[in-house]
Image (spheres, grey):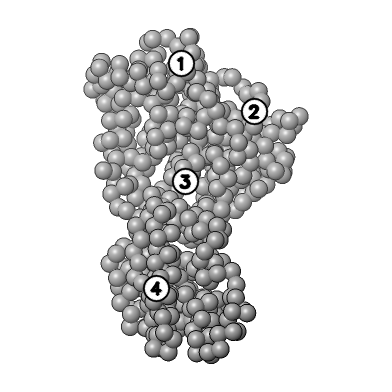
Amino acid sequence: MTKENAYNLRVGLFGIGLDAYWAQFEGLEARLKGYVGIVTERLGGYGAEIVNLGLIDTPEKALAAGHQFRREDVDLIFLYVTTYALSSTVLPVVSRAKVPVIVLNLTPEPAIDYQWFNALGDRTRMTGEWLAFCSACPVPEIANVFRRSRIPFYQVTGTLHDDPEVWQEAREWIEAAKVAHTMAHNRLGVMGNYYGGMLDIYSNLTLQCATFGGHVEIIEVDELSALRESVSDEEVQTMIGTFGATFDIQDDCSEFEIKRAARTAAALEKLVEIHQLGSMAYYHKGTGNAENEDTMSSVILGNSLLTARGIPVAGEYEVKNAQAMKIMDSFGAGGSFTEYYAMDFKDDVVLMGHDGPGHIAIAEGKTKVKPLYVYHGKVGNGLSVEMSVAHGPVTLLSVVETVEGKVILLVAEGESVPGPILEIGNTNSRYRFPIGAKRFTERWNSHGPAHHCAVGIGHIASKIDKLGKLLGIEMVKVC
């Protein structure tokens, strides 16, 4: 078990009420506890371990609940407002737990049956029925206390039953919490050194750890070269079999290059296991050391395999983009290393891709392997991958370090569209954006991202926005 998945995501839940009501209105407490049970069941279906503390109805219970949530190590709390409750039954819980809070303002049904309600003829019973629909009443009070206490909170408003929007929002909050949890436990390997002169990609590793959590492991290229020497012929043949099953290997790929790439891919697997890596950024010229040059010119296939199985690898030592790729992959969207290639004003699309590894799990069709006799701007030659991201909705994400020393998440939603690409042995896709190619490039560039970004399938800007809120960082959506 890796460090990344050794700890489960735990989500806290508590409902609130007022203990003075229970003796006054028969059945109200049991009814509201039943509603909390329904919420528990729904949230539990979204892949997190739910810590349900039930209905909190006094300040004393609230204090105990805050202690329990801290002991239970919850990452997120859902506060279900079932009826009117004192804000003093809320503040002790969340102030001690010190995790983000989602306020569920959910009524049992879309509306009270007024005719039935007014025909009850018993004002005590009528008041009890009203209180079962009274979830909206204390939310302003809770919001006031949260703001005055500097406690961030977010709201989901709707009905307990037959309200898909409510549960989609709740699901996205949990999915975002999962990604935040993954990043907090991720081990990011950085191997080699920066590509000299790319000033935009130089990253503040301390800022990255402070923002997302996790650990940065500094790795020497020499270690990977040494591991290549330990790879057996049997392991090489096994990896060649994996290549054959995974890639569309073109006829002009030599047996020598396939074996060279397979040996390095097997060594990369060992490196990941040794350091328990969940992502990696790398680059190294390898000049002056034949073994290191041999290693670094044969990593593309192995790094593509790692990326496809949830260990994204970013080239050119682009740490920020390794973070973006890990975020996208943790959302289940993929996250392929990419940059601007060209603009096609005739078709109003932007061509984007990159040399080196691609996220072959989100490719349109089977990824081709082609030999390159020169790695443009880099040392050596060898095998490379050629793929396009699957046609359909896509999201672009850039993790940006700002002049103020902060991190922001820059996002755009568009579409991967069919059409001619540059068949040069690299990843390459055609992207269309709702604001057009010109406006997209201008707006995207205006926020000062590095020239790399991560692209994944589906439109997930709303999820990334929630991740930003949970981490306390800004999300900027270009389109």
Q: Residue at x 36, y 21 (%)?
A: 242
Q: Tell whether 440 sits left or right of 325.
A: right
Q: Measuring from the top left, give residue 292's x and y in whole percent.
A: 35, 23
Q: Between disc 1 and disc 2, whose residue precedes?
A: 1
Q: Which residue is mark 4?
A: 33
**Quadrant where the N terminus lies?**
top left
Mark 1 residue element: strand
- Of callouts 2 and 3, the N-terminal one: 3
| Cα–Cα span, label 3 and label 4 | 33 Å
Q: Of the residues shown, which amino acid type is indicated by label 3?
A: Phe
Please say if 49 is above or below 262: below
Q: Where in the figure is residue 462, as x and y percent of width and height?
A: 56, 53
Pair 4/1: label in front = 4
Measure the C-alpha gap from mark 1 to mark 2.
22 Å
Of pointers 4 and 1, the one earlier in the residue sequence: 4
Looking at the rendered structure, which numbered label has been put on residue 331?
A: 3
Residue 453 vertical placement versus 286 (above, below): below
Q: Secondary structure at mark 3?
A: loop
Which of the labelled discs sits on residue 237, or is there none?
A: none
C-alpha separation, residue under disc 2 versus residue under disc 4: 53 Å
Q: CA distance from mark 1 to mark 3?
A: 30 Å
- The one of 391 and 302 positioned closer to us in this rendering: 391
- Which is more N-terminal, label 4 or label 3? 4
Disc 2 residue type? Pro
Residue that mark 1 sits on: 249
Q: Nearer the viewer, residue 261 or 101?
A: 101
Q: Can the viewer see residue 138 in this picture?
A: no
Residue at image coords 52%, 51%: 464
